[in-house]
Image (tube, rainbow, N blue to C red):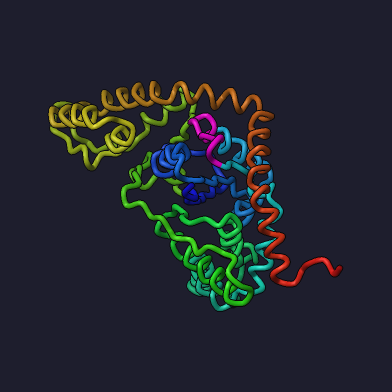
């Protein structure tokens, strides 16, 4: 029997999932969870969240919202291993062991750390490391532990995360050189086709810009947000360019090719912005209605979410425990008798 390829993805628990998250990452990952030729690992990266967020309630609420979102959208937990990072103690133990073979110079080159130092220098700070926590500095090591513990072959990432996969490979290779061949060297999987949605103000939809449309906003909130989307001043009846329009970009990410072609024609005919906004709201509301109901039911019964995560953690630890024992023995941490 051919061994399944292991694909691993982490979701940071610092905010509410939005439309951009869905079309760019969540939807393709959930579709991949149904591939019986792949062993997917999806985890809630709550330890990573602590690097950026020191609001305990926000981390807890985001963990609940992110888990409910993935489950409501149909994640195949029979095939995929879906777990919370903090439920796998072997990750933290491995992160320490890896830190003992990781050169400080490698961490000095991490993009996030270098950006923080550069910002301090440009602002005239005497201390280039002001505000830099060890969590931020060691982030690539914890990420390496997430990946290497489950011997992931592929890690889907954005271009800004490629360096972290390369660092994980460097750390794994160094460990293998010292202690023998234990780790798989992971490959970054970068999709050139991931949909990129614009937000309310025309910029990339992002929590950082405060321009998001939450994936499971209530019907009333969804309508209000869509009506706020920025458009140009072209009048009804004037032909409009769909390719430069946020409204059409959002619609196209959910629509079929035939539906997109039909709406493109309406743009050529001069559809009014108010008409397009109403059409987009009604279309999205129908598209998301069933999964929104499942999401709201899960939010009201957090025990079901917790059970799903514990079931996933049990499957994850069934693999992590014996591998961690082998790694402990390889570095000399083993029984004396």
Residue lying at 69% horizontally and 45% vertically, measured from the top left = 56
Image height of 171 relative to 254, above or below: below
For residue 304, which quarter of the picture? top right
Residue lying at 41% horizontally and 31% vertically, measured from the top left = 225
Residue 275 colored magenta?
Answer: no
Q: Is residue 262 left or right of residue 168?
A: left
Residue furthest front as drawn? 1
Q: Is residue 130 left or right of residue 164?
A: right
Image height of 41 relative to 125, above or below: above
For residue 252, say whether it is visible.
yes
Position of the C terminus, as image quadrant, is bottom right
For residue 235, say whether it is visible.
no
For residue 162, which quarter of the picture? bottom left
Q: Is residue 193 left or right of residue 305?
A: left
For residue 172, which quarter of the picture? bottom right
* Residue 122 on image: x %, y %: 48, 72
Residue furthest right as drawn? 337
Residue lying at 58% horizontally and 41% vertically, measured from the top left = 82
* Residue 230 on image: x %, y %: 32, 38
Q: Is residue 92 left or right of residue 52?
A: right
Q: Nearer the viewer, residue 45 or 32?
A: 32
The secondary structure that most of the magenta stretch takes on is: loop
Q: Nearer the viewer, residue 250 or 295?
A: 295
Q: Nearer the viewer, residue 192 or 94?
A: 94
Counting labels gives 0
Magenta stretch, residue numbers: 69-80
Residue lying at 23% horizontally and 32% vertically, measured from the top left = 257
* Residue 249 on image: x %, y %: 29, 38
Residue 74 colored magenta?
Answer: yes
């Amino acid at each position: 029997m051919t061994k399944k390829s292991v694909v691993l993805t982490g979701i940071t628990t610092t905010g509410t999932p939005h439309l951009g998250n869905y079309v760019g990452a969540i939807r393709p990952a959930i579709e991949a969870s149904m591939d019986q030729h792949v062993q997917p690992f999806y985890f809630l990266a709550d330890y990573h969240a602590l690097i950026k967020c020191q609001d305990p309630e926000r981390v807890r609420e985001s963990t609940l919202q992110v888990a409910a979102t993935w489950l409501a959208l149909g994640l195949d937990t029979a095939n995929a291993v879906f777990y919370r990072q903090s439920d796998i103690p072997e990750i933290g133990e491995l992160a320490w062991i890896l830190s003992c073979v990781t050169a400080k110079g490698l961490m000095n080159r991490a993009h996030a750390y270098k950006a923080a130092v550069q910002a301090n220098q440009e602002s005239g700070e005497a201390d280039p490391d002001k505000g830099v926590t060890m969590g931020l500095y060691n982030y690539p090591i914890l990420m390496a532990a997430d990946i290497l513990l489950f011997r992931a072959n592929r890690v889907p990432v954005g271009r800004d995360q490629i360096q972290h996969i390369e660092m994980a490979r460097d750390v794994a290779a160094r460990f293998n050189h010292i202690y023998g061949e234990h780790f798989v060297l992971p490959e970054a999987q970068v999709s050139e086709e991931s949909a990129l949605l614009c937000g309310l103000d025309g910029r990339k939809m992002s929590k950082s810009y405060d321009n998001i449309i939450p994936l499971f906003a209530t019907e009333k909130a969804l309508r209000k947000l869509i009506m706020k989307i920025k458009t140009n001043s072209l009048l009804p009846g004037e032909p409009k360019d769909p390719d430069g329009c946020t409204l059409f970009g959002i619609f196209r990410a959910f629509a079929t090719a035939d539906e997109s072609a039909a709406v493109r024609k309406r743009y050529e005919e001069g559809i009014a912005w108010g008409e397009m906004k109403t059409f987009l709201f009604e279309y999205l509301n129908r598209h998301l209605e069933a999964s929104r109901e499942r999401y709201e039911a899960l939010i009201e019964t957090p025990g079901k979410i917790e059970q799903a995560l514990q079931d996933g953690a049990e499957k994850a630890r069934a693999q992590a425990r014996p591998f961690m024992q082998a790694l402990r023995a390889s570095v000399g941490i083993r029984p004396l008798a």
